[in-house]
Amino acid sequence: MPTDRKHVIVIGAGIVGVSTAIWLQRLGSDVTLLDRQDPGLGASFGNAGLLAACAMVPVTTPGLLAKAPRMILDSNSPLFLRWSYLPKLAPWLFRYLKHANDADTQRIAASLTDITADTVDQHMALTDGLTAREFITCSDYVFAYGSRAEYLKDRYEWDLRAEHGFVPTLIEGPMVQEYDPGFGPKIACLAVVKHHGFIVDPGGYIAALAAAFQEMGGRVLKASVQDIETHDNLRPRVVTKAGPLDCDNIVLASGAWSKNLMSKLGVSVPLETERGYHIVLKDATGGPRAPSMISAGKFVATPMRAGLRCAGIVEFGGLEAGPSDAPFALLRRQVRDAFPNLEFQGEETWMGHRPATPDSLPLIGQVRNTGVYTAFGHQHVGLTAGPRTGRLVAGLIMDQSSNLNLKLFDPHRFR
């Protein structure tokens, strides 16, 4: 029977891809969600679970260039580098560090605010009428410091957050333990930001969203993508190991693995992986009651169904090498310092790949006039910005206008 419904293939079944697929299905497309793994097993599985509305401040703030060498050499710093990878990393790193100035930071923060600030509302809209809603918990977001002096060292970041509507409540001294008895005496100052949230099981959440997408009539296909073919005046095609798939549009949402597929479209993207680490302390008691950024270690401790997940750390080392021991050791030391009364029944460890661009902004938009749309490169804010990004890309494909300026997310901006 003839139909004018678009057929869209979404490559990548993390939070961005699944969100895009659901919104496309709701807007009247026939959608195939394609991934080499089951939904939710990439970076979307291993994040801190945080819906970080105030996460518009990039890592590349002014002063980073001077601090970076010392951080890399300090075993207590949350920045790690595999030295054998440095020659390959150097060109990207040079472009990345060039953004560590006030003008670029202000510009990046303004753009990130557009896709992060309403994250809780966007997740609620995504899960409207779905059982996946049960994975979402509204909460404070707590930044934990050893002292007010440590908090004031981050004044630039806090001033920038305030410009975008996020002003913290400061809690100090004995009031810290009254607010949350999980914190030990080494935490003496909290900056608490309201109107945030977290996901109690990120992997389970993505799986539930994918199941809901299938119930809506969507198709989930497990296959490795080998190529994307585009030709003038012809529909694009995805070539998989299982065979070719024709469609009207393609959405590329495969995170850190998107670079190779973009090159097949003739677009060179300076995309790196920030290797992120987490430890789940199973059946934990004595930890925090809300997601807490431990400033000393730059990691977030989030109470989840499986236990306390402690996630963060930045390591540059490429896509191929296995996990390093030092990031896990640092997480364990910092967790014990922050939460001395923590008890748990074993641990699970994980390492995954965050897709990082030199300007800390994702790629959202169409590749030339190919019918292929990009939705990757979210670095630290994939879970936070996934539903908003998915809604934007679905709108672009279905000719729904947006009041956001997407120029700074242009997939061609690195030419």
Image: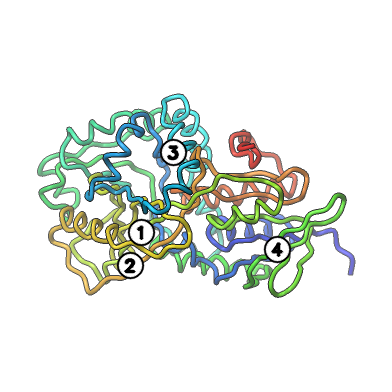
Query: What secondary structure is found at the residue carrying circle 4?
Result: strand
At label 2, counting other C-alpha atoms closer than 10 Å, the crowd grade (few under 14, some 14-19, many 20 or more) is some
**Amino acid type of the residue tagged 3 in the rendering:** Met
Which residue corresponds to mark 4? 31
| Occupied quadrant, residue 59 | top left
Residue 120 location (% of width, % of height): 46, 49
Residue 301 location (% of width, % of height): 29, 56
Q: Label for residue 349? A: 2
Q: Label for residue 277? A: 1
Looking at the image, tell me whether mark 4 or mark 3 is earlier in sequence order: 4
At label 1, counting other C-alpha atoms closer than 10 Å, the crowd grade (few under 14, some 14-19, many 20 or more) is many
Q: Label for residue 118? A: none
Task: Identify the residue at horizontal 30%, vertical 35% (top origin).
Answer: 67
In what quadrant of the picture does the N terminus appear? Answer: bottom right
Query: What secondary structure is found at the residue carrying circle 2?
Result: strand
- Tell us which disc is closer to us: 1 or 3: 1
Left or right: 105 in relation to 149: right
Disc 2 and disc 1 in contact, CB within 8 angstroms: yes
Above or below for 20 versus 110:
below
**Amino acid type of the residue tagged 4 in the rendering:** Val
Question: Separation of disc 2 and disc 1 at Cα?
Answer: 8 Å
Which residue corresponds to mark 3? 56
Task: Identify the residue at horizontal 64%, vertical 49% (top origin).
Answer: 374
| Occupied quadrant, residue 289 | bottom left
